[in-house]
Image (tube, rainbow, N blue to C red):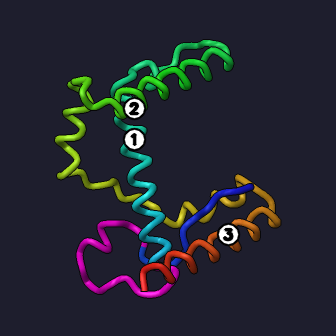
Amino acid sequence: MGYLKPYPDTRYHLADYARGSRPVRGRQEHFNKAHSSLRSVIERTFGVWKKKWRILSKMPQYTFKKQRSIVLATMALHNYIRRHPSRWDPEFNACDADEASYVPLVDENPAAEDDIESDVGDVVGAEYMSAVRDSIAEEIYMTRR
């Protein structure tokens, strides 16, 4: 597999789209906006998860197997609590209240994402992921027309 990176040299961050300087145009911008939005949701989820389950922020020196079990257990508990909103939880409620004012962090060096490709996979993997990205971009573009 590989890393599904955004298109380079194309608007990316949600803040760029929120400013409303111009509407989203073309397949690449539609893909980048969707990628940025999904990334924001993932970052927010991990932030809430690590805030709720503090052991994840400073994982003790357990074996890899035990660390994996801790991650899976906290993930299951996290999802259970989220799926059963009748269960009052102060940490989740605080994060939910913050959601309206949440602004995702903007990378100081968005070009650094281009470097991930060389760290993650080979040329074949990069070409494959580029084709996957193009296919997804086409689907997004066609559904939003």
* Mark 2 → mark 3, Cα distance in angstroms: 29 Å
The residue under the point 45% across, 55% down is 39
Give the percent coordinates (x, y) of residue 119: 70, 53
Determine whether 141 is above or below 126 in the image: below
Which residue does the numbered mark 3 point to in the structure image? 132
How packed mark 1 is, by other alpha carbons closer than 10 Å (few <14, some 14-19, many 20 or more), is some
The residue under the point 42% across, 80% down is 144
How packed mark 2 is, by other alpha carbons closer than 10 Å (few <14, some 14-19, many 20 or more), is many
Which of marks 3 and 1 precedes in the sequence? 1
Question: Contact, CB < 8 Å: mark 2 with mark 1?
Answer: yes
Find residue 45 and name its label: 1
**What is the three-letter code of the residue carrying label 3?**
Val
The residue under the point 47% across, 79% down is 143
Determine whether 62 is above or below 38 in the image: above
**What is the three-letter code of the residue carrying label 2?**
Trp
Give the percent coordinates (x, y) of residue 46: 42, 38
Which residue does the numbered mark 2 point to in the structure image? 49
Instruction: Verify whether residue 30 appears in magenta.
Output: no
